[in-house]
Image (spheres, rainbow, N blue to C red):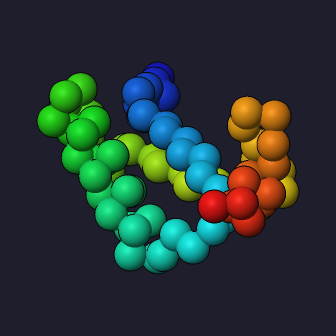
Amino acid sequence: MYYKRQYKMPYVKIEITRDGVTKEQKRALIKGVTQLLVDILHKRPDQTHIVIQEIDTDNWGFDGEQTTELIKQS
């Protein structure tokens, strides 16, 4: 009889605006979040999935304004 192995993989989604985040910064986020899950929740890094989704600043807003417009004002 075959039993399917159950994995409890963590999945973390990080949403950020697309405004100059570098490849190195993304790499550091992935590494840091993975290590945090290892240290605190004792998760296996080889089963930990981190996804970074970049959102165009026209599609992100707060305080009633598009982030694109807020960037222009600063």
Q: Is residue 7 above or below residue 68?
A: above
Q: Nearer the viewer, residue 38 or 65?
A: 65
Q: Measuring from the top left, give residue 60's x and y in whole percent.
A: 76, 47
Q: Measuring from the top left, give residue 34's x and y in whole percent.
A: 31, 47
Q: Measuring from the top left, give residue 2's x and y in whole percent.
A: 47, 28
Q: Is residue 58 above or below residue 21?
A: above
Residue 70: quarter of image: bottom right
Q: Nearer the viewer, residue 60 or 10?
A: 60
Q: Nearer the viewer, residue 48 or 74?
A: 74
Rendered residue at 38%/75% (across/down): 24
Q: Is residue 2 visible?
A: no
> Would residue 71 appear left or right of 35 to someone viewing this image?
right
Residue at the extreme left of the image, as rendered: 39
Rendered residue at 48%/28% (across/down): 4
Q: Is residue 60 visible?
A: yes
> Would residue 27 appear left or right of 59 to someone viewing this image?
left
Q: Is residue 73 above or below residue 14?
A: below
Q: Is residue 52 above or below residue 2?
A: below
Residue at the extreme front of the image, as rendered: 73
The total number of labels drawn is 0
Q: Quadrant of the C terminus?
A: bottom right
Q: Measuring from the top left, give residue 42's x and y in whole percent.
A: 19, 30
Rendered residue at 52%/69% (across/down): 21
> Would residue 45 appear left or right of 53 to someone viewing this image?
left
